[in-house]
Amino acid sequence: MRSTSRGRAHRRVATGTALVTVAAMAAIGLQAGPASAAPAKPSQGDPGQLPAKVSAQEYKALVGKAKAQEDTTASELKFSDKVELKAKDVVKNQDGTTHTRYLRTYEGLPVIGGDLIVHRAPSGEIEGVTQGLTSELKVNTTPRTLASTKPATPKAKGSVAPQKIVWMQGSNPVLAWETVVGGTQRDGTPSRLHVITDAATGKTITQWQGVQTGTGNSQYSGTVQLGTSQSGGQYVLRDTGRGNHETTNLNRAQSGRGTLFSNSSDTWGNGSPSNSQTAAVDAAYGAGETWDFYKTVFGRSGIRGDGVGAYSRVHYGSNYVNAFWDDSCFCMTYGDGSGNNAPLTELDVAGHEMSHGVTSNTAGLIYEGESGGLNEATSDIMATAMEFWANNPSDIGDYLIGEKLNIFGNGQPLRYMDKPSKDGNSLDNWSTNAGNVDVHYSSGIANHFFYLLSEGSGAKTINGVSYNSPTGDGKPVTGIGREKAAAIWFKALTEQMRSNTNYADARRATLAAASALYGATSPEYTATANAWAGVKVGSRASDPGDPGNPGDPGGSTTWAATGSYKVGDLVTYEGVQYRCLQAHTASPGWTPPNVPALWEKV
């Protein structure tokens, strides 16, 4: 447990003779060593490439400036008059560079998968653009068959009427309808099912669930500290130091905001699930630790970066064995588990669910296919990084997901990061079927990558837990430590990944992040490439390439202005080697130095 020495205005919360319940959701960390040791400061190659410590006011000013420059930016990028940009998020680095994420519209229609990131130097000059499109966006928005193929508006609560959109299938735009189907899923989780329908044929293109779920169990974190405040002579679970985050009681309901927890004293819960405040203590503690982790390590003030706190609802439904994040309410929700005796409120459950919110407000990874697996993996990765960082001696960091849940009744964890397939469902390595697997299982590929990048392959014991991580290519991987691995993933997520990023593109994004932080010839860059090769995504840093895997270099060729290139291809232009960042067909007049969004110098 950490004291208030980090400058937080906390109040000490006694939990009686028992420990405080909090639920598990992910496990990875920042620095090897015993959990009782103080968290080490990160050792970085280029501090200027780390995120700057941006206050909520500064962040709002950055976004405001980006919004004011939307038309100018579109002109700088030579977009047609039919295309408009809408600023979504801005990341500023310590050296003054900025990375602004834009949503794109075409003739006023949202372009899902058309988001892009504009990278600007401290001077304001555009240094590069990360996007999926490599040619001008063109689509017929008024086909004759449009009216006859419009889906009916669903009637279930939470549904949204169909809206016309442009859907990106790879780099090909398709006119479509997006319909949100509300209601309730089988396990009691609210449903926000996004269905994409081809506007010309009426056929369903794809669908994904908008409410992102995780699982955990009630384990104890000891006596913890919470941010509380006073109102009308009562103490309330409102954390004014963290964006006014509130913890509320649904009291078995399945809708509504719930009632803010209040108490006559500033001592909450007794460590037993029979006391309704205990779950609230755990949820509030987890939210506070997650807020502090993102702000202290990455300079991000809240989930959106704007200093506004989400809120947490506990005691959702009856016997609800799950927890979920919902963008529509900007809130986290926790069930009480089987028999209403095991609130799903452990520390890294909060980290997992809140990280879904961070992903939604940055890369916006669509919750289906390979991007959905990366979305889930991001929550596992960042939640466990937070768990190690929190350094709570009663909930020591590990690379096991939901190890305290006992969901299966045999004491086994929900997921394993060193070898994901040990759960019987998750993928250790990438294959062509990865996009067809449930996102909670395809996430194993990135979870395994992160473990290898952090700790390396082979047998070892960390914080008393034994691991033995294999590699898909049978070659060893040397880890670089959890802090560096987390820094690379967060930078890739916020500055490089887009809504339809797949595993090949995640490799590109993390390599770009490793190159910026540590250099393209650094051990960290090499380890990143080798860790991906260890899960069968791309080749080793020293290999000439293996065309059988996504993102592989495939050997070096001479630049051809009309050639077709895939991610990772190497070309030589005027004696300098470049690596392909996005699959595309080159146009006459293009050269690698003149299209930094598509090529990087090796």
Image (tube, helix red, strand yellow):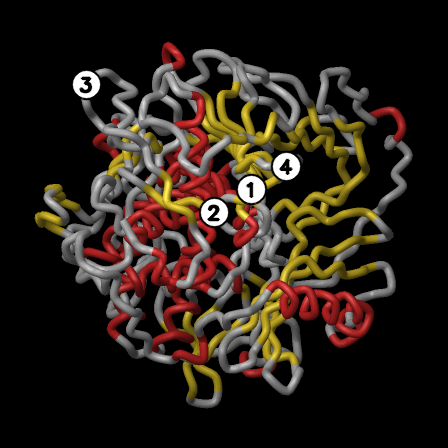
As shown in the figure, which amino acid type bears the numbered disc 1?
Arg
As shown in the figure, which amino acid type bears the numbered disc 4?
Gly
At horizontal 80% and vertical 74% (from top left) the residue drawn is 72
Q: Are marks 1 and 2 in contact (CB under 8 Å)?
A: yes
Query: Image quadrant of residue 66?
Result: bottom right
CA neighbours of label 3 inside 10 A, class few (<14), some (14 to 19), many (20+): few
Number of the label disc, if any, that sits on residue 232? 4
Residue marked by disc 1: 238
Of the two numbered discs 4 and 1 in the rendering, the one whose residue sits closer to the viewer: 4
Name the element at disc 2.
loop
Residue 393 appears in the rendering: yes
How far is disc 3 from disc 1 in space, using C-alphas?
38 Å
Name the element at disc 3.
loop
Q: Is 131 positioned to the left or the right of 266 in the image? A: right
Q: Is 91 positioned to the left or the right of 103 in the image? A: left
Sequence-first tag of 4 and 1:
4
As shown in the figure, which amino acid type bears the numbered disc 2?
Gly
Q: Where is 405 relative to 39, above or below? A: above
CA neighbours of label 4 inside 10 A, class few (<14), some (14 to 19), many (20+): few
Name the element at disc 4.
loop
How far is disc 3 from disc 4 in space, using C-alphas?
48 Å
Number of the label disc, if any, that sits on residue 227? 2
Give the position of the C terminus as an image quadrant.
Answer: bottom left
At horizontal 39% and vertical 36% (from top left) the residue drawn is 349
